[in-house]
Each structure stands twice: as structure tokens, then as C-alpha cells.
Image: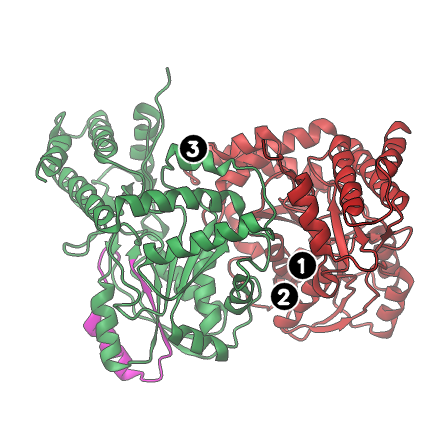
Chain colours: A green, B red
Amino acid sequence: MPLKSLLMIPGPTPVPEEVLRALSHPMINHRGPEYMALQRELIAGLKQAYQTANDVQIFPASGTGGLEAAVVNVLSPGDRVLAVPVGAFGQRFAEIAEVYGANVRRMEVEWGRAADAAQIAAALREEPDTRALLLTHNETSTGVLNDIRAIAAAARAVRPDVLLLVDSISGMLAVDLRPDEWDLDVVVGGSQKAWMIPPGLTFLSISPRAWAAHREARMPRFYFDFSRMKKSMETDQTPYTPALPQLFGLQVALRKILDEGLPAMFRRHQRLGDATRSAVRAMGLQLLAQEGSYSNSLTAVRMPEGLTAKEVRGRMREGHGVVVAGGQGKIKEQVVRLGHLGYVDENDVLAMIGALEATLRELGRDVQPGQGVAAAQRVFGDE
Amino acid sequence: MPLKSLLMIPGPTPVPEEVLRALSHPMINHRGPEYMALQRELIAGLKQAYQTANDVQIFPASGTGGLEAAVVNVLSPGDRVLAVPVGAFGQRFAEIAEVYGANVRRMEVEWGRAADAAQIAAALREEPDTRALLLTHNETSTGVLNDIRAIAAAARAVRPDVLLLVDSISGMLAVDLRPDEWDLDVVVGGSQKAWMIPPGLTFLSISPRAWAAHREARMPRFYFDFSRMKKSMETDQTPYTPALPQLFGLQVALRKILDEGLPAMFRRHQRLGDATRSAVRAMGLQLLAQEGSYSNSLTAVRMPEGLTAKEVRGRMREGHGVVVAGGQGKIKEQVVRLGHLGYVDENDVLAMIGALEATLRELGRDVQPGQGVAAAQRVFGDE
């Protein structure tokens, strides 16, 4: 028997059997009563999962479409924007704003480091006409988690009315995020991450401040227009045909999410992240993320001298059935990214670590059987 | 037993069991070898189904996203555009161009009529700096088929270099369309129509003339950018996570489509359209579309005096299990739209006609049992 495939990348993440089966629901009329009840249920569930009383909208698109929607719905060409990219997806967020004519200042940090709340506050003091901040909650290219709560508080202390646009595509549900308590204006999510459903949907929460900005925002938009979506949602519909399979999947996934409960989901991801990091260190490898800014969705591991991501990933996949991701952008071959978000449990992490251990040994590195796995097991036994 | 539901709307269309099952394929790495082979196969199959040697791209979006992509990739703000809306979706195409700053002239026709090639040629003569034509192949709101071949020839005779952007979302595969032979620049398709897969994907073919225009086009775009997609496609990938379930479905659907063969698909839709129209007339009802411009994807039926689309549709659904669509835009209650595209056969049409017959009788109209069905049967027996 060929090895089963264990998908451990930071999205698409594994999808539970019952969600996969729900995708196969026969088509329905997206203007009929069955659809309208479905959409009502999904929006209510999304608000719970988002921990928000703000409007939440669903667009049939990848997460990148959600980032575009966040930008074009609340900004006008020429608006001053402070982008704080800590990796490839933060760069993408900034690039979208530039393409649509915003005046973007990029506050860059070295990849692996987190954004600094005090520096952001200082930049807002320097440029008080800054209209919006582009922030990344969890940076998928580096495995860095930003402290959005601290950043939001620092930014609001300087500029109470600045727009906070947050990419939490790979963060939400793996790590706590509070759009309302932390006063975040637009928060973008993506279906193929901790939501446990396939790619194809992006979610956005929209604060009253974002709606006020929207009414004056002049960047052009049609497909991703909040107003058109809001108008259709008044009758529990969408302005164009929705991606039904993912919505049927979301219905089942939301029940699983709310059954497990958000605090339990956050604890599970914390434990999976702790175990992975502990195992990686025990094998003598280094993390890309700096201490204190660890993502619980994925772990980016620096390749030791003389090894490329490509050969490590290839051997893990071909020899051990475990699929992990390489680096992105400028660090493509220098890191391997281990995903541990969504429908992932302790056994999946042990198998992933075991495959990495064996691969390193096969490539001539001095790693003993169990060296990483034992470290992960200690974390799991430590509850 | 409650009645089974027979979905006869012009999209989402019924999806074959084997395609529904394919949607449930477990997730794979969208940067790995299995995905890359899938994308190669899909693009090759799409080109066959599109009857084109031009580039074809797939975006994770609804058809409206495809219309936006067609506009923003080849035009600049201020460009003069001639839109020829023959219904709600043609209006939408024009509105997208306006939102992005094109200088749009709308050549309106009464709903139910087709676009006139000679008038279009005359308009191009009047305004020789027209950069693009926005055309609808099959107008889903009225059941009108435009003669794209004649329109393209007439337009090219006046302006050989004008850009022809064609919405064939509900046309393609139901009716013949030849992007290369007819020299069409961008042709937009949508997964939930005759392709027999769920909503969530839009397809675009891009001619060399469209690529040349793209290089100078200055409308802002990111998610729908042709260049970013083309660059990723060089390594059989996408610039962001693709909608995997629909792609797994497309793989199965394309095999079915190419097995049936395009000429057979066109003949099947012709027969289903002929039978539906014949039955509707036999019941004493009137078609919205004018003679000679009939869609083979759907039939829009005028409601007789005193009946609303809502009550007819409600009774067909509740009493007979047949789901049909109402009108759109300004004719919402005045027409019922009967879908007969995609995975639909003669029995489905007979059942739909039977339900409409019974409904009319129940609503006090003078329609005899079999009056419409017999007319449809005569068409089917007539092969």
C-alpha cells in the first residue's frame, strides 16, 4: 500500500470527513427559501466565531480577494496608509493598496520578527493624516504572530479614528482575536485555514467606523463592494451566485467549531504549536520566528546549512507521506513551514515530527530516532 | 415521501452525481506536483471546450467576477466603450465598466429583443475611437441569444482592432461559440451553467489582441489581474489558493463534456429549448424573447394577465417539486424563467412542463392535462 498523504501545510488544511461529504450536497436555488435559511444560519455562526457584533460578509473568493475587499471598500486614491508587513502576505496587503492608488508607507521589519506597537504609534504621530493601518495577525510566510491587541491599543491612543484593517486569514480560530473588544475595523478571514473547509470563501467583519469610511471611499469596486453585498443580504441573498459547496461545508464546520468552543480551539492550537516548536528545537533546528512572537498556526523552520527546503520536503513527501510547505518569496529554500492549524490533532503533529526526524537522518544529519517526537510527547503529556 | 426537488433554473444547474462526489476529494497542496498535473489537465480541457488556442485562465469567483476581470484587464479610465445590454446581465457588464471609469455608451434594446449587428456597426462608425464592445452571448434575464458571430463580423468590418469582450456565462457549451474563428478577445464563462459543476469558478479566454491591450490598460486590479495569473501558470500554479472542490469537479465534468462532444451538447440543448418553447406555446403562453433570438439555455415565459411569477413558482415548487426562476430587475414578477441547460435531459423537461401545466390548471387557467407535455414529446420524437 502506498503511504497515505498527511497534509501539514498552512492551508489548504485537512477537511473533516463530514465537511467533505457536505460539499457534495446537490445544488439549490440561491434565490429560494432553503438558501435564505442557510445564509441566515451561516452569518449568525460566523459572528459567533468572529466574536463580533459587527456585520460579517462572505465573498466567493480566495483570501487575497478579502484583502482587496478590505482596502477598496474603505479607502480613496491618495489616502495615506501605513502598512506593517512582517512577511510575504503583509507585502501583498500593501501592494494591493498601492495598486489602487493609496499613498503607502511601509514599515518593514526583518522576516521572523513581529511588528512593534511603539514604532507604529510613533509613525502615526509623525504622519497624523494616516487614514488606515494594514496589519497582519498571523503571517503565514514566517510563522510570526503579531500582538494585534497591543498594536491596536497603541494606535488608538495616538489616533482614535484611524482605520485598522487586519488580515487574520491564518490566525483566526487558531489564536484569539477580538474585533469588538480591540476595536478592529475590518478583519479578513479565509475558509481554507482554521475554519476546516476548503478554499473558496473569504470572510470580512465590518465595524461602524469602516461603514462610515465606506460611504466616502472612492476606490473603484464592484465584485467586492460591501454595499451591494449588504443590500442583497437584507433578503438573505447575495448579489451574484454564491459558492454553494463551501457554504454547505461551512454549515457543518461551524457546528464543529462552536461545539469544540473557541477557548478549546485556542488551547489546542497552543499545544500543537508548543509541541512542534519544542520538537524542532530538540532536533537542533532553529525557528524563523523570534521568541515571544510564535504563531500557533504554523512553524517556519530554518534549514540547516547545506540543506534546501526542496530536498527536505521532497523526502518527507515521497518517503513518509507527509506534505509540508517550503518558504515564500525571498526565503523560499531557506525554510520549511510546518502547518498545524484547523482539523489537526496531536497524532498528526507526532507523525509530522517523526517524518522530519527520519528525513534529517536520511540526509546525513545527526538526529536520533525519537529525539524530536519525545519532546513533542512531553508537551502533550504536560496538560 | 416528500417530492424530490427538480432544479430547473438557469444556474446553479443540476450537478451529476460523479461530479458531486468529486467535490469531496480531500485537500491537496496547491503548490505540489498533484495539483500542478491537475491544473495542466484542466487548462487543456478548458481550451478544447472553449474551442480556442488562446490562453484560458480560471479565477475562484462567481461569473460577475469574470465580467469584472474582462473589463479591468484591458481598459483604462476614460476609454470609450460601447455596451449593448439586452437585459440585466448586460446592464451589469456596463455598470462594471462605468464603476472603473470607462466612458460607456449604452445601446439599449427592449427586453426580449436581441442586439442588432448593423446598429452596432453604425455606432462604431459614429464613434471611431470606441475601444471596446461589451457583448452578451446569452442573456440570462430574458432568454435571448445574441448572434455574436454576426455582431463580431459587422464590428470588425468597421473597426478591425476594437476589443470584443463577450459574456458567455450562460451560453457556452449550450450554444456554439468560436472565440478564434469569430475573433473574440475575452470570453467569460461561469462554472454553474452548462459546465455541470457548482458555482465558484469563472473562466476567461484571452486573445493576443487582449494581451496587447492589457499591457497598456490602467484600470486598477490585483485579485483579477491576468499578468499575475499568467506568471503563476508558468509553473502550473495560481497566485493564491485555488477553489479546489470546484477544480476536482471540473476534472470530472470536462471528461463528460468531451465524451459527449460539443456538437452533441449543442444539439441536445437545441432540442431541449425547442421542446420547451413548443410546450409553452401549446399552453397558450408567450415567450419574452423575440422569434429568431431564442436561448437554448433557458426560456423566459410571460405570465398571463392576473398571475405573478411568485405564485406560479411557489406552486410549482411546493406542489410539484420543480424549482424554476422568476424574472430579474424590472420584470421580476412578469416572467418565469425555465432553465434547461447543463446536466438536463428530456425527462427533466417533460417533468417541468407537466408541473407548469398542472400549476396553471390549479390557478384556474384553461389548460388540459398533456397539452404542453404532448408538444414537447412531439419535438423529442422528431429526431
Left/right of residue B165 with respect to residue B232 in the rendered view: right
Q: Quadrant of the C terminus of chain B?
A: top right
Chain letter of disc 1? B
Left/right of residue B339 with respect to residue A209 in the rendered view: right
Report the span colored magenta: A111-137
Residue identifier under label 2? B216
Q: Give the foreground label among 3 and 1.
A: 3
Q: What residue do we see at 43% from left, 66% from top?
A: A70
Q: Earlier in the sequence, mark 2 or mark 3?
A: 3
Q: In this view of the protein, which residue sits in the foreground, A80 or B253? A: B253
Q: Secondary structure at mark 3?
A: loop
Q: In this view of the protein, which residue sits in the foreground, A212 or A285? A: A212
Q: Is residue A337 above or below residue A149?
A: above
Percent x, y of residue A330? 34, 52
Q: Which amino acid type is marked by label 2?
A: Glu
Residue at mark 1 shares a chain with residue at mark 2: yes
Q: Residues within 10 Å of mark 1 (few under 14, many from 20)?
A: few
Q: Residues within 10 Å of mark 2 (few under 14, many from 20)?
A: few
Q: Earlier in the sequence, mark 3 or mark 1?
A: 3
Contact, mark 1 vs mark 2 (Cβ under 8 Å):
yes
Residue identifier under label 1? B212
Which circle marks residue B26 in the picture? Answer: 3
When asked about the image quadrant of residue A284, the answer is top left
Q: What residue do we see at 70% from left, 64% from top?
A: B329
Residue at mark 2 shares a chain with residue at mark 3: yes
